[in-house]
Image (spheres, rainbow, N blue to C red):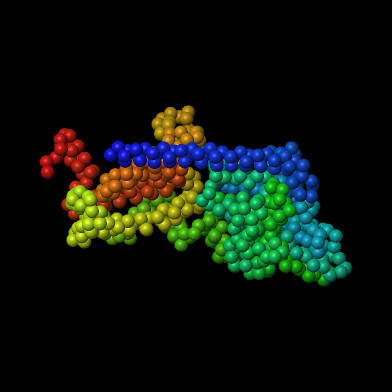
Amino acid sequence: MEKEDQRNFLLAMVLMIALVLGYQKFFVEPAQKKYEAQQAAVEAESQAKTADTGVVAIDQLKPVEEALADNARIDFQGEGVDGSIRLAGARIDDVSLHDYYLTVEKKQEVRLFRPENSEYGYFATYYWASGGTLVAGRNSPWTVVSGDKLTPDSPVVLKLEGDGVTIERTISLDENYMFTFTDKVTNTSDTPRSFRAVGSLERFGDFKGFLEATDPGSSVSTAAHMGLMGHTDGSLRMKKFKGLYDMKSIKGESADGTFPAPNGGWWGLSDKYWLGALIPQQDMFFAGMIDKRKLATGKDLELRTESATLDLAPGASATMENRIFAGAKRYEVLKDYEKNLGIPKFEDAIDWGMLFFLTKPFFYALEWLSGIVGSFGWAILAFTVLVKLPLVPLYNQSYKSMAKMKKLQEPTQEIRERFKADPQRQQQEIMKLYKEEGANPLGGCLPILVTIPIFFALFKTLYATIEMRHASFMFLKDLSAPDPTAIGNLFGLIPWWSAADLKSIPFLGMVIGVGILPILYGATMAALQTLSPPPPDPMQRRMIQFMPLIFLFVFGGFPAGLVMYYVWSNTLSFIQQYFIMRRNGVDTEIGKFVKKLFSGGKEPAS
């Protein structure tokens, strides 16, 4: 490397490091301090909320078990969920999910819904209104008519008698996560009245804190949509939590602030893997809405649905069937509800991303393969082979082109030296050489056009589908999480330093927190580089040589399943490319190294 090139290279590296440090100092740290100050202000304000907002003051919050004991309840037990319903308001505010745990150690189930007077309260129900008055509201006293415990085989019946109205509510639970409220409303007054069902899904507290309490680590997720998600008027409506609290506009909102749904739909809050959703009767009009007055507090997020009115003569009755989903976004479950209950686009509660036309087929393939090979880990390895098989002709053509380019490396260098003073003639002679030998300098780039969308689609598949969550394989406890090993603890040999702790160290953690899979990725990427012709420019060549090291650190934070895919993909590509190089009579750096190794360190004879 010439002195000038060395100087330019070192200068580029210094500037890159300065850029990273400067960004951390002048952007990340001030943003974090601003966020903490805002949170402190919101905490102080929330303690002074008036009763009409529905917010419970911070100093009145209790542990979940104590909060549950404050009200009369009826328990439920299903195959997918368990918990209890608060009789005051007929509110589902206690839901734990079977088979899903906070951590890979599987000690505590995920609790999705919580009572209002506990930290991060989250609950749902259906109220009833007549005119501008709630006849069945937040704390209306429902009584049990029949059933002492709700199960998939035994519904419970509740009753509410109010001023001029009687509501009989039958609550049923299926084998997964769907609660059905079948309400029979009777006008007991002596005048005609109109009634409408009001669905309410309400969540308290800082949204990042809620995400961490429900699913540790999910608050830093940027690759999965978290926030408002619903389907109204034939379109999917989405807005992330931050956008909601910032009062950003949402596509599809009418002039009166509602989202009309004349042909069925749903309205809910989506976390990375979990969903709470209101699903009104699908053959009736409803309007989705967000209570912006509560949203302005920064601590109370309520979504509502309002049905079309039921006009009842004195003594007349009408029945309406509304549903609440509270559970995991399992594809087969959502798809089944979409098909059998007629809930439009319910499977799209999973954030498939813009490349959904690839993400969905990838998921289907992985799900199918896991059923055959027994785990998602082996399925990813098998899937890698399936993805590469149709691309073999493309890769072969690309590698043949690269083999020719590598073979022409010395003649090309001779032309550069011969016509060093005449760049135009130099370029003409090089292109003439390429034409005579049938070499295409861009031929090696063709596979990149295919692998880039595959990369993003597979990343999304592994990141957003709950089927990958806590799926283990060999030393990996969770294929959807980063590699749990780290250089800093000798890949687990030093047990008192966890990889997570090492990775959390500012700057240094990026280096000592790198796991074995990202290192293998960097190594396989470097091995592949030895089979490709290097760029003629020395500076560019040095930068290319540093790419495996850079990507090693970049891949350190990616899901382990994705990194495993690319390590295996690089390995297969290396074998394929090496074989083609040898068939075309091109000696490779790896080949030279192996020959030297087996010849006792002596340079092999030409």
Q: Nearer the viewer, residue 429 or 251?
A: 429
Residue at x 56% of width, y 63% of height: 345
Give coordinates of residue 516: x percent, y percent.
39, 39
On screen, residue 152 versus residue 516, left or right, reads: right
Q: Tell me if residue 86 comes above or below residue 345 in the rendering.
A: above
Give coordinates of residue 242: x percent, y percent.
62, 50
Q: Tell me if residue 373 comes above or below residue 117 in the rendering.
A: below
Give the residue furthest to the right.
190
Q: Nearer the viewer, residue 221 or 158?
A: 221
Q: Nearer the viewer, residue 297 or 101?
A: 297
Q: Tell me if residue 382 comes above or below residue 598 in the rendering.
A: below
Q: Quadrant of residue 395?
A: bottom left
Residue at x 33% of width, y 48% of height: 570
**What quarter of the picture does the N terminus occupy?**
top left
On screen, residue 420 versus residue 177, left or right, reads: left
Observer able to see residue 606: yes
Give the residue furthest to the left.
605
Tally of numbered discs: 0
Q: Nearer the viewer, residue 436 or 407?
A: 436
Residue at x 23% of width, y 59% of height: 428
Q: Quadrant of residue 265?
A: bottom right
Give coordinates of residue 104: x percent, y percent.
51, 41
Observer able to see residue 527: no
Residue at x 42% of width, y 47% of height: 561
Give coordinates of residue 387: x percent, y percent.
36, 57
**What quarter of the picture does the C terminus occupy?**
top left
On screen, residue 257 versus residue 162, left or right, reads: left
